[in-house]
Image: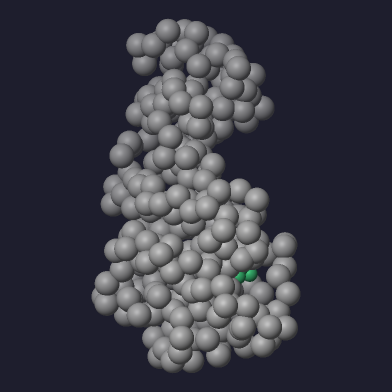
């Protein structure tokens, strides 16, 4: 079948099935073949790979994945897209579609059954309304992951790869960088999608670490400290932690823990590296 990745073919399929876009599902379909080539290249897909696609839409990216990978499973929430996908993917015998909310699928079981429990690659043009929950649930659940190559809002991509002391640095940067190393593969303007989103987009690859770059005794405490530090950006780290609803440390405990880092007592959370947050968590869990 002719590829869907151009505006004419996309319109033809949408009209044939009388499809109407649903805003609540974050539907912005890709219509630019160069962007699709870039996603496949960034994901470094080979014929050995099992790929999970989240939100195939009408199957535009799925067709490219099917040609590059050994096997593709695509999870789509919108049931009106299922008959369309049956049609647009009929030429490929290595693709299956699951009609479900990806947050409800047992992906660990899927990886076990279809890939012998070996790390899978996730590739997606993500629905922007749930980008962060999808990415964090993939990292936090114990799905074996090699990498995630995803289209996200440009602003979110910048936050994921930001380092200390920059304006984009925050809880999301640290959460992502605890699990994976980010690589910004491409910037993608609104005119590459139908309908056009109101924001710029970017393709980012997150390669999961085999071992986390820092070791903490209490992972939950690490993330509570990170959230508390960035919840109150204008405050010093010490005040942010002492005043946090999520934490229960005295001013003296916090001051002593900050002192072990060898930084000024008036330091702000946004200046700390992941290593320093980890050291802080370890000092406070003693
Ligand atoms: N992959 C297609 C493309 O690039 O043209 C479509 C991408 S579109 C940005 C996002 C897709 O995710 C839509 O098809 C939407 O229906 C689907 N989707 C939204 N929420 C979902 C969820 N919770 N689980 C699975 N799919 C979802």
Residue visible at 56% across and 73% down in the picture: 7
192 or 180, which lies in front? 192
Q: Position of residue 144 (x, y in %)?
A: 37, 62
The N terminus - image quarter: bottom left
Taking 209 as reference, is 114 above or below it? below
Toward the front, the furthest residue is: 8
Left or right: 48, with 286 as reference point: left
204 or 118, which lies in front? 204
The C terminus - image quarter: top left
Q: Where is residue 25 in the image (x, y as percent from the top left)?
A: 67, 64
On the image, which quarter does residue 279 sit in? top left
Q: Where is residue 136 in the image (x, y as percent from the top left)?
A: 51, 51
182 or 187, which lies in front? 187
Taking 249 as reference, is 38 above or below it? below
Left or right: 236, with 24 as reference point: left
Residue visible at 54% across and 42% down in the picture: 155
* Rendered image coloring scheme: one colour
Q: Can residue 261 be seen in this view?
A: yes
Q: Where is residue 36 in the image (x, y as percent from the top left)?
A: 42, 67
Left or right: 62, with 12 as reference point: left
Q: How many labels does the image show?
A: 0
On the image, which quarter does residue 215 sit in? top left
Ligand 1 is located in which of the four quadrants? bottom right
Residue visible at 47% across and 12% down in the picture: 267
Q: Is residue 101 visible?
A: no
Left or right: 220, with 217 as reference point: right
């Amino acid at each position: 079948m002719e590829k869907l990745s151009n505006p004419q073919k996309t319109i033809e399929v949408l009209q044939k099935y009388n499809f109407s876009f649903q805003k609540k599902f974050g539907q912005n379909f890709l219509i630019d073949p160069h962007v699709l080539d870039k996603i496949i290249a960034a994901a470094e897909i080979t014929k050995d790979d099992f790929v999970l696609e989240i939100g195939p839409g009408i199957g535009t990216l799925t067709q490219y994945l099917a040609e590059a990978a050994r096997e593709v499973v695509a999870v789509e929430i919108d049931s009106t897209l299922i008959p369309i996908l049956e049609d647009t993917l009929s030429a490929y015998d290595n693709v299956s579609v699951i009609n479900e909310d990806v947050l409800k699928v047992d992906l660990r079981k899927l990886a076990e059954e279809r890939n012998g429990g070996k790390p899978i690659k996730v590739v997606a043009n993500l629905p922007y309304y749930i980008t962060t929950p999808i990415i964090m649930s993939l990292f936090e659940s114990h799905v074996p992951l090699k990498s995630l190559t995803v289209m996200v809002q440009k602003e979110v991509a910048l936050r994921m790869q930001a380092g200390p002391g920059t304006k984009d640095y925050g809880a999301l940067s640290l959460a992502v960088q605890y699990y994976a190393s980010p690589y910004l593969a491409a910037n993608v303007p609104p005119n590459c999608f139908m309908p056009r989103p109101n924001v710029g987009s970017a393709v980012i690859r997150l390669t999961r670490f085999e071992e986390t770059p820092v070791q903490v005794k209490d992972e939950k405490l690490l993330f509570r400290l990170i959230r508390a530090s960035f919840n109150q950006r204008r405050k010093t780290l010490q005040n942010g932690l002492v005043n946090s609803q999520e934490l229960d440390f005295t001013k003296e405990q916090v001051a002593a823990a900050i002192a072990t880092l060898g930084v000024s007592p008036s330091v702000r959370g946004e200046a700390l590296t992941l290593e320093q947050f980890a050291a802080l968590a370890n000092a406070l869990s003693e």
